[in-house]
Image (tube, rainbow, N blue to C red):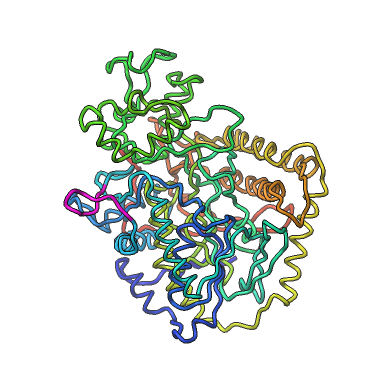
Amino acid sequence: MKLDANIPAGPIEKKWDSHKFNLKLVNPNNRRKYDVLIVGSGLAGASAAASLGELGYNVKVFTLHDSPRRAHSIAAQGGINAAKNYPNDGDSVWRLFHDTVKGGDYRAREANVYRLAQISNQIIDHCAAIGVPFAREYGGQLANRSFGGAQLSRTFYARGQTGQQLLLGAYSAMMRQVAAGTVTVLPRREMVDVVLKGGRARGLTVRNLVTGDLEAYSGHAVLLCTGGYANAFYLSTNAATCNVSAAWAAYKRGAGFANPCFTQIHPTCIPRSGDHQSKLTLMSESLRNDGRVWVPKAKGDKRPPHEIPDEERDYFLERRYPAFGNLVPRDIASRAAKTVVDSGCGVGPNGQSVYLDFRDSIKRKGEDKIRAEYGNLFDMYYQITDENGYKAPMRIYPAPHYTMGGLWVDYNLMTTIPGLFALGEANFSDHGANRLGASALMQGLADGFFIAPSTVAGYLGATKFDSATTLDKEFGESAAYVQERVNRLLAVKGQKTPTELHRQLGNVMWNDVGMARNEAALKKALKKIPEIREEFWKNVKVAGADKDLNQTLEKAWKVADFLEFAELFVRDALERKESCGGHFREESCTSEGEAKRDDANFSHAAVWEYQGEGKEAQLHKEKLEFEHIKMAERSYK
């Protein structure tokens, strides 16, 4: 496997503009000759489809859901970053670039991150133009609030529903192209394989989730916009259908998988309440603008929060990180919460949570102002917990949320398979070892609206394509491979449901590969995961038929992939013998318990190449160079 990031030469401020100029173009009258297949209809997928359709390409969009609007981007709450500097508090493209590289603990590619910051302002202009109802100040200017890892306000928002409103904007732009005839949306389809011909991605095998039929589609380029894999932990803030399967299918066809162990544990989630749960619920990071995080100073203090005076409270984020307070980056806030809970100061029925308290903000601003900014989040908290966050502190605890790892891509967002692109959370490129809050929406829309339309066109314009139709043997071989795996799943006829086995995997991942990792626990996980996988293939129970609506079969397919992927995840965590961002190795920390990087040995992206069934993946390394941001120990004190 050859890793060529294709980073253009020249000053970092001019790389993207000069690169766009040097990319090949496709004549407008020739664009209708090209078929582009997009998997996923979230922000990255919908925006890419809208943009490429507008340019005149033939676009097909495949989504698991009955409507593209149900993609998981809709669950994002707090906001989207951009370097507009509307509050006049010192922001700039360069500062957003710096904060993102630092927030990712210097484990991201500089050129990609600068481009993201550079494009951020265009995203806001474009989204406002297509009707996204961002919050506004009294005078009409778009409002900003603060998020973790920044000492200024650069986050644009739509109350606590920013992801929903942005997705509706991208969806409406895409559906305009559906009406124009350039985009076709194929709902209730799950991609199960990438078809290669002549070493290039030339099509897909998908399963119709209503009929169970396998369908083949050919094209000139394939874009994977399929999100992240936090459900490897079973309980996460992701929707239950979020999975690694599309990316894993690409990996098994030759796409490199980068930094799989880089996962984000979000500090602001409703705590788990028992084994009955199928997912966890995010409470937006934006709440930490006005909520103060604390625990009782005394261990085991079971008094109601209103009976604990301020002098007996530990506002531990404000104490440990006075410069940033409650708005430190997510990895740091999560580990700090774990530390106080592990010390015996946790609150709630099982002592596994901390308080997020709005008492002081309500006194200062008034309940009406807090309700106007965060009302839907307080409503959601009440519906789930039956507790009123206006009257008593919310209880929160960290949970798996986002994955910085993903398919390796170059500067053009193309994987190691020519013609196969990965956009948004499905790729690894922008966030290093920790994503700053409000940057996921920024990346998804940057990739879809502004980067892919240029780079995909550059690929199409520079490539001479041989004929590829669904009658070719490569498509038949792909369908046979998928059908054999379906038959194998149905033939087991065991006693455990896919969900039971997924929960077993999740327990191992959370307990041994969660917020704090060490060599002994990782090696233990590497022993347990193959045992669960072996049990899965001997004892999974998949009821129902193949050629039918069969959600148990859908689930079993995803769990089978998680059980393979989890082993690579742990192997990557074991190989990276340093702490950085969300990857915290207990053997590598400072005297104050903070992450301690090893830049001499691990300043690289770890890219894994599939070697075949039952064989260990091969590790490749893309060295990370830092010419513009000086590497330093992260400090938010």
Question: Is residue 537 or residue 257 the one in the foreground?
Answer: 537
Residue 637 position in % (x across, y down): 29, 35
The location of residue 268, given as percent across then percent down, is: 41, 35
In this orientation, does residue 527 appear?
Answer: no
557 or 98, which is in the foreground?
557
Question: Residue, x 40% and y 47% (percent of image)?
Answer: 105
* Residue 631 shows up from this direction: yes
Residue at x-position 45% and y-position 29%: 338
Q: Percent x, y for residue 380?
A: 43, 36
Q: Nearer the viewer, residue 122 or 131?
A: 131
106 relative position to 207: left or right: left
- Where residue 617 appears, as percent x and y from the top left, is 65, 54
Magenta: main secondary structure: loop
Question: How many numbered callouts?
Answer: 0
Q: Quadrant of the N terminus?
A: bottom right
Q: Residue at x 45, y 31 (%)?
A: 397
> Is 413 colored magenta in this rendering?
no
For the record, the magenta segment spans 133-144
Say whether residue 141 is magenta.
yes
Nearest the viewer among 264 and 28 is 28
